[in-house]
Image: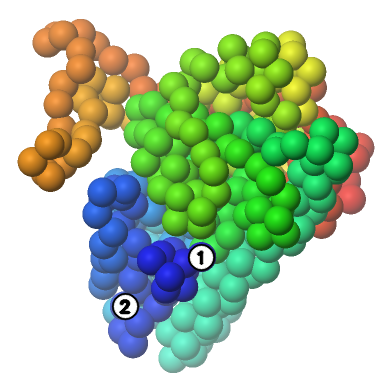
Amino acid sequence: MKINGKPYRTIWPTADAVEIIDQTRLPHVFATLRLNTMRDAERAIRDMQVRGAPLIGVTAAYGVALAMRDDASDAALADACSVLLAARPTAVNLRWGVEKMRALLAPLPERERIAAAWKEAARIADEDVAINAAIGKHGGEIIRTIHQKKNTAVNILTHCNAGWLATVDWGTALAPIYTAFDAGIPLHVWVDETRPRNQGASLTAWELGQHGVSHTVIVDNAGGHLMQHGRVDMAIVGCDRVTARGDVCNKIGTYLKALAAHDNGVPFYVALPTPTIDWTLQDGVKEIPIEERAQEEVTHIAGLCDDGQVRTVQVTPQGSRAANYGFDVTPARLVTGLITERGVVKADAGAMEVLR
Ligand code: MRU
């Protein structure tokens, strides 16, 4: 994707380190950040300087490479894997990225590990880009079909940020939107603000704007109203983990959008790279660990002030406690289809077998 006309990925290796776009500073400041050590990579994941399931997985892979550069011993490999795995619990791609690196590196002699680690991390990053481009192609066809039927702009609702910022490039939920937009299909995106971290209002809106896609930011509770009035043709969201029977774990609030979509006959699609499927799990509500984050993300909010400074203010009364569940699970029965790099598949155990 391009920023002010210049092509960027969200993460890239340099001669001796890794660079990322610091997403905590967007949309007001575009800044890149150097990760010099495995601990820097772990902090970037934990503090959400990088976020989004696929990008978390790739950052973790580069984190292992950084660890190997400093110490390629068995102990250092085991330590890096366990530190990175603990950075955020919900996205299965984190485990996928780390385990890929471990499986490749563990059997190698120490002297071969550094080069192999950098090569494998780069390969995982490239694979993510190719996967997302394919998701864009398959999902773009759904948008095209809707457009052919209605003949006016297609209105698409999305939640959180599952765009190119959440991946290495293209995005998952936004890849079909970019593909359709680039093909000249008229469309408009309703962007859920996505409290408490506002990934929709600050990240999705920013990247859609960079690409020139028409969009409107709405408060998280507006989706149901818009659907009741026929102003949403489809919803597409990303996900952090999908179970073998098609239950979908995504940013908190996704479940409520899926319920509203179901009630109003609006197709509700989930876009995902197949590494996001956790084949070890069935019942997402019972089995997926939900990340609980700091209260301050709910009690406080950051924004751009009139003097050009970004400041954080408190929105709750002093002393009120806050709960901050990062994700929820949408049962498979509410999902119209899973848009994967291998095609669009029904969210049920039998249909999903083709993805194994
Ligand atoms: O907490 P975040 O910002 O990492 O949550 C991200 C999401 O919920 C995304 O929609 C999901 O990871 C899919 S990213 C392509």
* Residue 150 figure quarter: top right
Work out how far the residue at label 1 is from the one at label 2, CA to CA, in angstroms: 22 Å
Residue 17: image tag = 2
Residue annotated with mark 1: 1
Circles 1, 2 touching at the beta carbon (< 8 Å): no
Q: Earlier in the sequence, mark 1 or mark 2?
A: 1
> Is residue 273 or residue 183 the one in the foreground?
183
**Residue 40, visible in the rendered structure:** no
Q: Secondary structure at mark 2?
A: loop
> Is residue 97 or residue 34 the one in the foreground?
34
Please state the horizontal and vertical placement of residue 307, each as a whole percent of the image. Answer: 8, 41
Residue 253, placed above or below residue 203: above
Give the colour scheme of this rendering: rainbow
Number of other residues with Cα within 10 Å of mark 2, as a class: few under 14, some 14 to 19, many 20 or more: some
> Is residue 337 or residue 234 the one in the foreground?
234
Q: Viewed as shown, does residue 209 lie left or right of 28?
A: right
Residue 116, placed above or below residue 12: below
Please state the horizontal and vertical placement of residue 107, each as a whole percent of the image. Answer: 58, 78
Q: Viewed as shown, does residue 37 lie left or right of 190?
A: left
**Residue 141, visible in the rendered structure:** yes
The amino acid beneath tag 1 is Met
Please state the horizontal and vertical placement of residue 333, each as a whole percent of the image. Answer: 79, 22
The amino acid beneath tag 2 is Ala
Q: Disc 1 or disc 2, which is closer to the eye?
A: 1
From the Cβ of disc 2, is ligand 1 less than 8 Å away?
no
User: How many marks are shown on the rendered structure?
Assistant: 2
Q: Secondary structure at mark 1?
A: loop
Instruction: Please tell me which residue is depicted at 89% across the width and 50% down the height of the picture.
Output: 354
Instruction: Please tell me which residue is depicted at 49% across the width and 16% down the height of the picture.
Output: 221
Q: Viewed as shown, does residue 30 lie left or right of 175?
A: left
Instruction: Please tell me which residue is depicted at 20% across the width and 13% down the height of the picture.
Output: 316
